[in-house]
Image: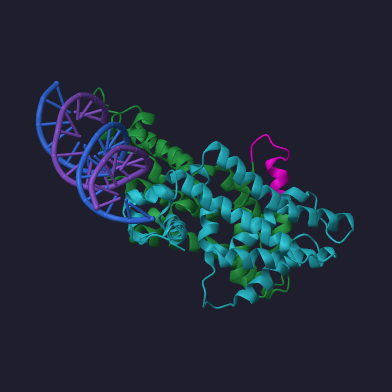
Chain colours: A cyan, B green, C purple, D blue
DNA sequence: GTCTATAATTAGATAGAC
DNA sequence: GTCTATCTAATTATAGAC
């Protein structure tokens, strides 16, 4: 459709974000230069500014996109009605989603300090909304007598930390399969809340 | 004892490390300049190099000191013989120690990427040795029939992540006291391994 | 032990040619 | 849309005066 030779905006934009994601995850946002990102993509540093107004916005876009994807994926997940089944489904979903995106997960937890106040607020709101999904499951289960939790918010934070921690040590091709790990973690989560 | 006027090596060294700890925790290692650290201490940038050969070693020293302190503190802790009591003691110790040092904890988890290979190996060995303490408790408890864990290593990683996660949200003066939080977490840890 | 001054390098971001 | 060239500012680390 009459696109000019040398025009790649539809592919270069995503490649810039992919390169930034990989480099930020590996070396940290502050330690990565725009020149490094450009080299990874195969363009000159100046060309990056066609796809992001600045480095900070590039980071914020990655984090917000990740959290919106997390939220959308969880919203699309089937939700069992029984508390125990609902918690089991959440745990397995959480581990699956996070093991699929170790780099985005890493950045979303480690680079909060580098966000502007407005972007930080957006990111925290998205994360909070996702956590609320788990808290609702725990609250319903506690009300129904299926769980015993003295404080649903605290139990939520504890379970999220436990489940997300998988990304810190899990390596593909290791001793345990992904499914087996998810199974064991889901069982621990269930038992932790007295289910 | 005949110390020269203007000589402060015995106090400036620790102050350099304290300033670096605070700034690295707040803004990240790569985002903090030697000039910022010097300004925080109240000396010029050049003077810092009397106390550390370079920025990277300053970071490594902070992390290694933190992990050695963790190991020593745990070694000095009374160790109940019964598995349930031992796990309870570990959980409470872990939370207390980590809530006392949020900045060092943050750095020890977030700045691993900025260590040289040798320092990284030292840090990982220290962390692993500490984790082994918890794994031994779980293994003994499982052997004695007090715990039900399909995989002690995995349960170890899950519990450590859960317990350490407290540092991500706990704020002094909040809704729950430190002791109450530790109590609830220790109970969840116990239940998670079927104790 | 601390300072000032500086070397050598690199950073983020922009301008203008093509 | 990308490149080259460049601006301005900041970086780590060192040298030498005091």
Q: Does B181 lie within the magenta span?
A: yes
Tell me where residue A128 appears, x and y as whole percent: 68, 48
Residue in the foreground of this view, choosing between A1 and A193: A1
Q: Which residues are magenta?
A: B171-183
Residue B11 picture quarter: top left
Q: Quadrant of the C terminus of chain A?
A: bottom right
Q: Is residue B20 visible?
A: yes
Q: Is residue B68 above or below residue A178?
A: above
Whether residue B17 sits left or right of residue C15 in the image: it is right
Residue in the foreground of this view, choosing between B102 and A99: A99
Residue B136 picture quarter: bottom right
Numbered disc total: 0
Residue in the foreground of this view, choosing between D3 and B87: D3
Tell me where residue B122 appears, x and y as whole percent: 39, 60
Tell me where residue A74 appears, x and y as whole percent: 70, 61
Q: Residue at x 77, y 59 (%)?
A: A193
Tell me where residue C13 appears, x and y as whole percent: 37, 40
Q: Residue furthest right?
A: A144
Q: Residue at x 48, y 45 (%)?
A: A57
Q: Does A149 lie within the magenta span?
A: no
Q: Residue at x 60, y 65 (%)?
A: B156
Whether residue D14 sits left or right of residue B185 in the image: it is left
Q: Is residue B79 visible?
A: no
């Amino acid at each position: 459709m009459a696109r000019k030779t040398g025009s790649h905006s539809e592919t270069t934009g995503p490649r810039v974000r992919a390169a930034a994601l990989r480099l930020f995850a590996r070396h940290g946002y502050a330690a990565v230069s725009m020149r490094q990102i450009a080299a990874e993509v195969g363009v000159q540093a100046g060309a990056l500014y066609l796809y992001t107004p600045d480095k900070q916005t590039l980071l914020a876009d990655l984090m917000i996109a990740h959290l919106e994807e997390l939220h959308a994926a969880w919203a699309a997940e089937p939700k069992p009605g029984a508390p125990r089944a609902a918690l089991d489904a959440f745990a397995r979903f959480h581990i699956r989603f996070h093991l699929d995106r170790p780099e985005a997960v890493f950045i979303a937890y480690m680079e909060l300090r580098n966000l502007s106040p407005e972007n930080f607020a957006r990111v925290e709101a998205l994360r909070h909304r996702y956590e609320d999904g788990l808290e609702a499951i725990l609250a319903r289960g506690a009300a129904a007598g299926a769980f015993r939790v003295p404080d649903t918010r605290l139990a939520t934070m504890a379970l999220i930390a436990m489940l997300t921690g998988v990304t810190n040590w899990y390596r593909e091709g290791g001793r345990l399969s992904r499914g087996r790990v998810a199974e064991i973690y889901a069982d621990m989560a269930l038992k932790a809340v007295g289910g």
